[in-house]
Amino acid sequence: MKTGEKLSLCLLLLIAFAGSVAAQELITNVYGRNIHSLNGKWNAIIDLYDQGQRMKIYENRQPEGNIDFYEYAFEGGLRLNVPGDWNSQSPELKYYEGTVWYARHFDAKRLADKRQFLYFGAVSYRCKVYLNGKEIAEHEGGFTPFQVEVTDLLKDGDNFLAVEVNNRRTKDAIPAMAFDWWNYGGITRDVLLVKTPRTFIKDYFIQLDKNTPDRIIARVRLSDKKAGEKVTVAIPELKINAELTTDAEGKAETVLNAKRLQRWSPEEPKLYGVTVSSSADRVEEQIGFRNITVKGTDIYLNGKPTFMCCISFHEEIPQRMGRAFSEADAAMLLNEAKALGVNMIRLAHYPQNEYTVRLAEKMGFLLWQEIPIWQGIDFTDNDTRKKAQRMLSEMIKRDQNRCAVGYWGVANETQPSKERNEFLTSLLETGKQLDTTRLYVAAFDLVHFNSEKQRFVMEDSFTSQLDVVAINKYMGWYHPWPVEPKDAIWEVVTDKPLIISEFGGEALYGQSGDENVVSSWSEEYQARLYRDNIRMFDNIPNLRGVSPWILFDFRSPFRFHPTNQDGWNRKGLISDQGMRKKAWYLMRDYYMKKRNNR
Ligand code: GCB
């Protein structure tokens, strides 16, 4: 390249960067830092025609003198709770898909010896953040966190924060145009002001080596590329106190020998107090250690072949008809999972809030976390692919130290094509660059009955890249039985562990009817369907887990049946009012037997 060309390229890059405000790499364990909550009532303006930008309402101007006026004000209008979706907070926002502006004031102090960050747990779906009238960040993706440094942007005293939030569905989004859950919009998770020392512990990964029961990998990275800094990783209960020295990148890595380590398991979810410290910083958290591996068609948890008794739920409190966002919400969802007797939860179909993940770990649930690559994704679009890679990275980085997470899910019900394969392969590559200690999984729905072979089969070459293959199959609901359940034999990806990641059917709680008639929407039919599927499970030689769809009835805009559905997907084992259906008891008994190896 000639010098002139080089210069113009540099200029182009400079312009590109000056115009963009990329979200910054996440700080590990935000909740373990010095944080100040910005949750609460925020002022809001509904901007149906997207005019707020043009009017620069983020500047929050107040009229001066007699001839000055503005056609907006944040004060004195709509107030919305943060965290929270907007749909459940005002009747006119129930179906709203568009822009809502959120704004609030907060007091801050510029601090010479500290750095400060604004952290958003999740904003659904895309947003721009403005501080004191200036755009400082943007983010796309409704289920992963982001942060922006504001050290030099804060003012002493009053600061004005505005967030332009938009949840319009688009073809290039993830998820895309149609998905079977409610498109909640808003600032749906915590907003925090985080203070750190000038040079702080930005990132750490402390997990058990995948294949050994007593070697802990510890990787730490400082916020600055400072060589020769001392960093300590201490686990007092294990008598570990390791001093590491950073390299020129500000990184340090070691393997810790953990004799007499009690591994985390669903039965005994043991966690250890871990402290990571440097000369200026100190972060504490509870971390657990476990091995999860695959050999042949078995999934080994801590070296023991384990059957995954699993359940899914959406991040939704059905009784409130809104997104779950608090520790109390997490407790409600997880207590019901506990009562069902599961050892694993698939957090469907997107990364759920950190309260749920942390409490699940304490309560002893293995977790499958996934990004919302849910049908209908545009696999030909390069930008969509980059988005998916970023979402996956954000999910992994947030929860990399949660030993409860045993699986990273990369897709749900995708159709084979060259573009799909390349897209998903790139996701696996991204994931494995960050974490090789978890299993990689995806759910497929292409299993069909081959009448010549008299077997259920599936051809999808992408399955060869996964550790565990998951199948969503609605026998007795979307698919009539081609043979009796006792004769429904499977020959699907026979060399790998298989999890039935979805099965089930709908029933309206309290509706009784003929157990042979699917259109009765009765608890009896749903229970029968469960009995039949459970019978079929015995015919899947490589079956290593099952997960009914789903724990609770959930809201879905395209469930049109006026009396049986009324905007709800009724496949829950528990109704929207929290009542257990007949199938719940069947599944509880099945899991009790499975977990007692009977
Ligand atoms: C599926 C999807 C899930 C739906 C479910 C259903 O296969 O993965 O998101 O809610 O079917 O009820 O149709």
Image (cartoon, helix red, strand yellow):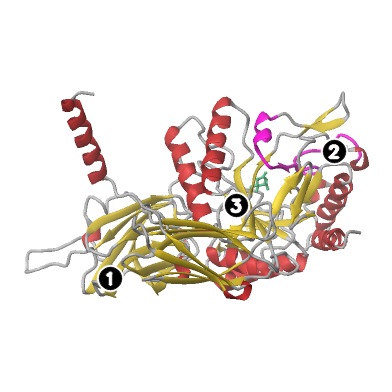
Q: Residue furthest left?
A: 66
Query: For this rendering, which residue is in front, 104 or 543?
Result: 543
Reading the image, the residue beneath label 3 is 556
Q: Which mark is residue 481?
A: 2
> Which is more N-terminal, label 1 or label 3?
1
The residue that appears at 22% across and 40% down in the rendered structure is 14
Reading the image, the residue beneath label 1 is 75
Query: For this rendering, which residue is in front, 305 or 168?
Result: 305
**Magenta segment:** 460-484
Check whether the beta carbons of the residues at disc 2 and disc 3 lie within 8 A of each other: no
The residue that appears at 67% across and 29% down in the rendered structure is 461
**Where residue 378 appears, x then y in whole percent?**
50, 34
Left or right? Give the position of 584 relative to 121.
right
**Where residue 107 appears, x then y in whole percent?**
27, 75
- In terms of image quadrants, where is residue 402? bottom right
Query: For this rendering, which residue is in front, 470 or 400?
Result: 400
Q: Amino acid at mark 2?
A: Trp
Looking at the image, can residue 183 be seen? no
Provide the secondary structure element on which disc 2 rests. Answer: loop
Q: Residues within 10 Å of mark 2 (few under 14, many from 20)?
A: some
Q: Residues within 10 Å of mark 3 (few under 14, many from 20)?
A: some
Q: Give the dominant element type of the magenta stretch: helix, strand or loop.
A: loop
Check whether the beta carbons of the residues at disc 3 and disc 1 lie within 8 A of each other: no
Q: Quadrant of the N terminus?
A: top left
> Which is more N-terminal, label 2 or label 1?
1
**Gap between marks 3 and 1 measured at Cα:** 34 Å
Q: Residues within 10 Å of mark 1 (few under 14, many from 20)?
A: some
Left or right? Give the position of 554 relative to 223.
right
Looking at the image, can residue 446 be seen? yes
**Gap between marks 2 and 3 measured at Cα:** 26 Å
Q: Quadrant of the C terminus?
A: bottom right
The answer as to whether callout 3 falls within 8 Å of ligand 1 is yes
